[in-house]
Image: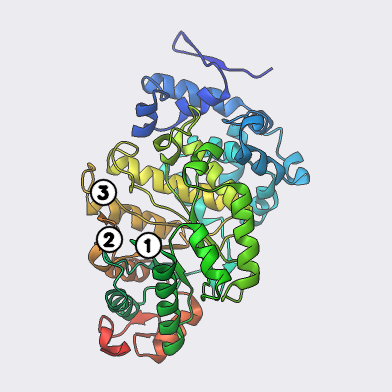
Amino acid sequence: MVKLATTLLGRVYKFRDIKEVLSKANEERAGDLLAGISAGNVKERIAAKVVLAELTLEDLRYNPVVPFEKDAVSRVIDSMVNEISYKNIKNYTVGDFREFVLSASSEEIAKIRDGLTGEMVAGVTKLMGNLDLVYASKKLPVTATCNTTIGGAGVLASRLQPNHPADDIKGMLASIKEGLSYGIGDAVIGVKPVSDNITSVSNILRAIKEFMDKWQIPTQNCVLSHITTQMKAAKDGVPIDLMFQSIAGSEKANNAFGISIALLDEAKEIMAIHKSSKGENFMYFETEQGTELSSEGNNNADQVTLAARCYGLAKRYNPFLVNTVVGFMGPEYLYDGRQVIRAGLEDHFMGKLTGIPMGADICYTNHMKTDQNDIDNLLMLLGMADCAYVMGVAGTDDIRMMYQSTSFHDIAAVRSIFGKKPIKEFEKRLEELGIMGEGKLTSAAGDPSIFGL
């Protein structure tokens, strides 16, 4: 019998089901308030956390926030559970599991990862403080290999994001040259195009690959168009190292993206045959808290739990990269800097606990109650937590997407503060080009003319 009530200071708090417990145990979030599912006050939130701490991981497995019979994501995640790993932890309460994650070694945690579901991952996250999330994340290394390997010790990689408001390839190349001159782009050179036209997408992929080949840059190319466009490009023989798609934590929300499990499966099969990259990890996914609510696909579940389910779904495809675009959707979902910071730490921890290489686009829109100082704080916290990669955007200002992120200079600064480096092969090439030396940028850094005018 699942216990769904507790008494605090003489008052009894009762919850309808596990989904309500998860929702009300969540830290304050604008999206949950908008959906009408958040705790009414701090006392109710604490009561929900108390109840959650006493639930078992088995309770969470068999009570997904979207029922198995109604949702393909629920079914997929459960089908991937390793029953041996699960058997070793199923009787843990969520409180016990929190203590295990904080006290266990990296190797001990790795042994039980495959026994987890999104609800379990979300549940333990809700009992963690920000410091807990940083501390635990640092113990959860995850590596993957495309052309290069992400997630190595002492590495903070970066996605070079040379977006252009008119999809002008010369403009993109100018931004690529500048970013590379600051040591940015070792995770991927990834463009979010204005047009989803197959010709435009193919031309951008070819241009990036030609530049990579000419200058012998060891990284990956990617164009963040709809996955169906990339599938066509791959079958047409266009060089594509990484295939991208935004995903959500429910079947209904994924349908709103124009995708399904079957389509993602087909995309992976196509890439396995036609990819221009070398390694076994060649998929790339983005997520964001609030996605499901924005498409009315949240099933009255909270945005943290749905985000955790995204990472469970992503794991099916053995991705090279996954990142949260924390803050991009605006104040309706993450109201201010405090909520953005918390969400970024939650997403990063949940992805790594699930077992995927997790990065972050630390960003915000200009109508949010936040600023670049909040973004700096989250960037530093994720640097401490051994985040796999972050975004490199010229001047922090993405002129195509109209939002603020992290700059080339920001990443260089955080690498210097924490003694981190780019991916090894990438760093070696930058040393050959005179951009880096002894793990640091040289006086030549920031000069795009290194790559020609």
Q: Mark 2 to mark 3: distance in Å?
A: 13 Å
On the image, the x and y values in percent for residue 61 come to 66, 33
Amino acid at dot 2? Arg
On the image, the x and y values in percent for residue 288 come to 42, 46
* Disc 2 to disc 3: CB gap under 8 Å: no
Element marked by disc 1: loop
Amino acid at dot 3? Thr
**Residue 104 visible within the image:** no
Q: Depth check: give the residue in front, 418 or 65.
A: 65
Per the image, the residue denoted by label 1 is 192
Per the image, the residue denoted by label 3 is 365
Q: Mark 1 to mark 2: distance in Å?
A: 8 Å
Where residue 331 is drawn, which disc sits there? none
Where residue 400 is drawn, which disc sits there? 2
* Residue for point 25% across, 62% down: 396
**Residue 286 visible within the image:** yes
Q: Depth check: give the residue in front, 270 or 10.
A: 270
* Disc 1 to disc 2: CB gap under 8 Å: yes
Decide: is 198 above or below 28.
below
Q: Earlier in the sequence, mark 2 or mark 3?
A: 3
Amino acid at dot 1? Lys
Decide: is 281 above or below 40.
below
